[in-house]
Image (cartoon, coloured by chain):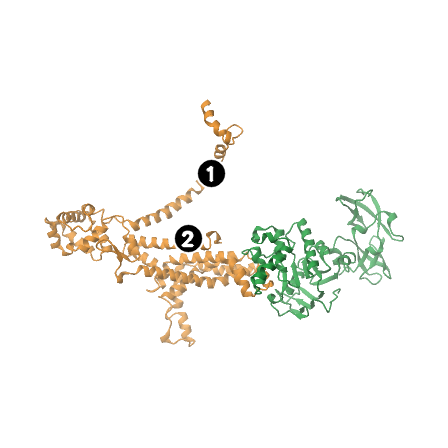
Chain colours: A green, B orange
Amino acid sequence: MAADTRADGFVVFDHVQKSYDGETLVVKDLNLGIGKGEFLTMLGPSGSGKTTCLMMLAGFETATNGEITLDGRPINQVPPHKRGIGMVFQNYALFPHMTVGENLAFPLEVRGMAKSDREAKVKRALDMVQMYAFINRRPAQLSGGQQQRIALARALVFDPALVLMDEPLGALDKQLREHMQFEIKHLHDSLGITVVYVTHDQGEALTMSDRIAVFNDGRIQQLAPPSDLYERPENAFVAGFIGENNKLHGKIEEISDGRALVRLPTGELIDATPVNVHRKGQSTLVSIRPERVEFKPELLPPGAHAIDAEVLEFIYMGDLFRTRLRVAGSDDFVIKSRNTQGQRMLQPGEKIRIGWAPADARALDPVN
Amino acid sequence: MADMTADHMPQAAAKLTTADGRPLKAALARAQSSARRRAFLLVLPLLAFVLLTFILPIGQMLHRSVHNNGFSANMPLMTQWFADNPIGTQPDEAAFAALATDIKAAAVARTIGIVGTRVNYELSGTRSLFTATGRKADDLAPPYQAALVAADEQWADPVLWATMRQVARAYSPNFFLAAVDLARDTDGSIIRAPEDRRVYVMLFIRTFVLAALITVCCLILGFPIAHLLATLPLRWSNLLMILVLLPFWTSLLVRTTSWIVLLQGQGVVNNTLVATGILTDDTRIQMIYNQAGTIIAMTHILLPFMILPLYSVMRPIPPSYVRAARSLGATSWTAFRRIYLPQTLPGIGAGALLVFILGVGYYITPALVGGASGQLISNLIAFHMQDSLNWSLAAALAAVLLACVLLLYWLYDRLIGIDNLKLG
């Protein structure tokens, strides 16, 4: 698979497998290297094994097989409290019977730090998230966003080199979530810590990560920087999971150095870039981003094939127009166009011709 | 109308009124009155039930603990004489005349036994004095002092007269004094009861110590079970919960007697220990008809009262708290002590309070398996209710018990806070 194990990684998963019942594998042969200072996101639908991986790294689950190393040291047998990994939980897990200050002092206290040092560190960590004024409050007296900041400060207060975050923004509303994304990103940049972040929100993953590991069915489907992941998905799952994609089934008609012609069931020919298809006659799934589809013939690249489409629905979304088309017999082909000066608003029933640059359409192996 | 306006004008300026000029408060009260009346009618049956079956009997019991007119109602002349003459007055012929007249009247009315019983509470062995003299009352003739002393020379005993003076008052704190092992001297001052009759304080102490011990046992046994119930998947925890509740659905008598079967000298446990060679026939352990029996059986019976509040507090505590503590560097013991345990305090408090209060008042189990050393204060209250028929003393003992429990409840409220209590 795409997992390029960095042998010198700060965190390394080496052929890690996990089963809860001895019958099915939740994590199937995971190989992953995470560099020091990297922001790596594990992205995937629920049940894909991403949270289990995080829990194995934190020490709350043991790997059934394989080895996890942290900074070169195998940690399979190390109990959670000796791993020195900061962790932010989905529901924050702030101790309700302690004040904010006591919550932050807790990790320092159990490390036997002197009181004066503790106070200085707690102040520094709270200042970092602009929450020092709340030091004497109880978690229940704080809003969701404030609790999130405290949880973040608590995970960072004992200067861990690695911080794990398990869907930390899941409970916040959209605006606050976006704000916190940037804040976490800034903290990561300024502190130079390594972050492993788990989410099922692809927007969050794209915004924050250095690299994203897309999980499905216990395997990493693709491990790549956000732009690669979005623009060059390596299989049908990734293409469908990240962002919106139009999918056209067809058969390879012609394949030659980086270009392919695909014949649709209706007999039309389209251009595509072969990704994991290799021979003529193979069935394939062509995926094209809605914003890369062109419906003005004059803007199509020279030599590109164009096909017929019928407008079914036009939705005005403010900054974007979203148009649903019938293409090659399927009713869910979507194109997006920016609401620029003089942009055409397509009318339902209108017959148009659409096309795209061959590089934007990716011919993928449909069984994957 | 005119004077009404004049009356209301100064206030109306300050108060809000409805659109048609009525004061807003009055309008609101009228609008809500029918709803309020209906709500009151709905709770009325319960209110009446609680009043009749709970408040009234308790009030009556508390009243009985300080009030007993067994003497004063049946010996009016004697009561009058004690009222007229201060304490320390030697009984004169007038006093003996009043006594003889009262005894004659009581003998006719067949209340002489009640009088004798009342005096007997304070001075044992005097009931027969009254009933015997009552039988011969017709023979009594003046001078009464000589006649009564001739009938039984105990009538000249100053202790008897001091006792009669005390019981002549319908309201007296004497039963409470007796309940805490105190008594009255002949001159009315409070002294400790004779050594061989000091039983109640010791029993109160034993009751509270045993109840505390049972509470601790329940906590130690119940905490892990409640934790298991709270962390297991619902399918399994429901099954376990049924096992926990099973004792609730079994008769208390059956459960207690099955403990007898298990624990007695020739019982299952001892037989097994002997059969496996751990004990010999001479060293069988006495586990029942003593304090050990009371503790074992009551711990078993009261365990669900500890488990249920604990469970209801533990169930909503997400495992992420302990995980967070572990990831922050706490050992599992520290995480338990600093993070998990404090969050279960409301459940521990509720369970301990329930078990302790129920344990302090438990009656059947200690009566059946407690033997002599495992009897609690409630067994003695029952004894005074059923056997000695000294209801006033029983009431006083119960009132002391109630006061102690209320005191503990108040202490709990001060230390932990009653709003911190979670019963389920």
Residue at 54% over, 57% down: B315
- The label on residue B110 is none
Q: Quadrant of residue A277?
A: bottom right
Instruction: Give the quadrant of the C terminus of chain A.
Output: bottom right
- Is B181 drawn above or below residue A31 in the view shown? above
Residue that sits furthest to the front in the current view:
A116
- The label on residue B410 is 2
Residue B277 in the image, given as x and y percentages of width and height? 42, 77
**What amino acid does circle 1 point to?**
Arg
- Is B165 drawn above or below residue B370 in the view shown? above
Distance of label 1 from label 2 (alpha carbons)? 33 Å
SS at mark 2 in the image = helix
Query: B125 or B400, which lies in front?
Result: B400
Query: B251 or B56, which lies in front?
Result: B56
Q: Mark 2 Cα within 10 Å, few/some/many (few <14, many 20+)?
A: some
Q: Is residue A329 left or right of residue B203?
A: right
Query: B247 or B116, which lies in front?
Result: B116
Residue that sits furthest to the right in the current view:
A303
SS at mark 1 in the image = helix
Q: Quadrant of residue B7?
A: top left
Task: Please give the residue where the numbered disc 1 appears in the rendered image.
Answer: B36
Chain ID, mark 2: B
**Do the residues marked 1 and 2 share a common chain?**
yes
Residue B329 in the image, given as x and y percentages of width and height? 59, 64
Q: Who comes first in sequence, dot 1 or dot 2? A: 1
Q: Mark 1 Cα within 10 Å, few/some/many (few <14, many 20+)?
A: few
**What amino acid does circle 2 point to?**
Trp
Residue B40 visible in image: yes
Residue B298 in the image, given as x and y percentages of width and height? 40, 61
Instruction: Give the quadrant of the N terminus of chain A.
Output: bottom right
Q: Indicate which label's residue lies in the foreground, 1 or 2.
A: 2
Residue B319 visible in image: no
